[in-house]
Image (cartoon, rainbow, N blue to C red):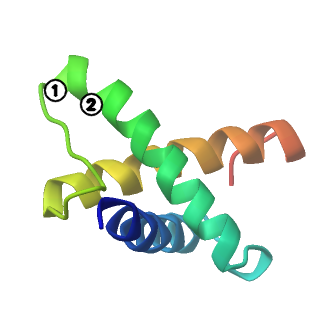
Amino acid sequence: MGWIIALIVGGVAGWLASLVMNRDASMGIFWNIVVGCVGSVIGNLIAGPLLGIGGSVQEFSIMGLVVAVLGAVVLLGVVNLIQRGRVR
């Protein structure tokens, strides 16, 4: 059951991050899920030691969703930097 929740929360987090970074038109649902789940890992690696907060996408919480979205935004910023040479 935790994996189903992780996929749903990851998809929502990836979709919200793609809206923030203006990449919604170029990403499908699969990439939204991938970006959201990887962004959750990145967000937990960054937010855990620095801010003392963390969340998991396997059990739904607002803090977990916020951390996943922030991590996904960072991931999309890095991808934009590599692809285009700038962050938009």
Which residue does the numbered mark 1 point to in the structure image?
A: 51
Q: Nearer the viewer, residue 10 or 87?
A: 10
| 51 on left or right of 18 | left
Residue at the right extreme?
84
Measured along the vertical axis of the image, is residue 58 above or below residue 45? below
Q: Position of residue 88 (x, y in %)?
A: 68, 55
Res 12 → quadrant: bottom left
Q: Marks 2 and 1, Cα distance to the nearest angstrom?
A: 5 Å
Measured along the vertical axis of the image, is residue 88 above or below residue 29? above
| 45 on left or right of 60 | right
> Residue sitting at 36 percent across and 26 percent down?
45
Residue at the top extreme?
49
Measured along the vertical axis of the image, is residue 72 above or below residue 54? below
Q: Position of residue 83 (x, y in %)?
A: 87, 45
Res 13 → quadrant: bottom left
Which residue does the numbered mark 2 point to in the structure image?
A: 47
Residue type at tag 1? Leu
Q: Position of residue 58 (x, y in %)?
A: 28, 56
Which element is circle 2 on? helix
Res 24 → quadrant: bottom right
Residue at the front extreme?
1
Is residue 63 shown to the viewer in this render? yes
The reply to whether dot 2 and dot 1 touch (C-beta < 8 Å) is yes
| 41 on left or right of 65 | right
The N terminus sits in image quarter: bottom left
Q: Position of residue 39 (x, y in %)?
A: 48, 46
Q: Nearer the viewer, residue 74 or 38?
A: 38
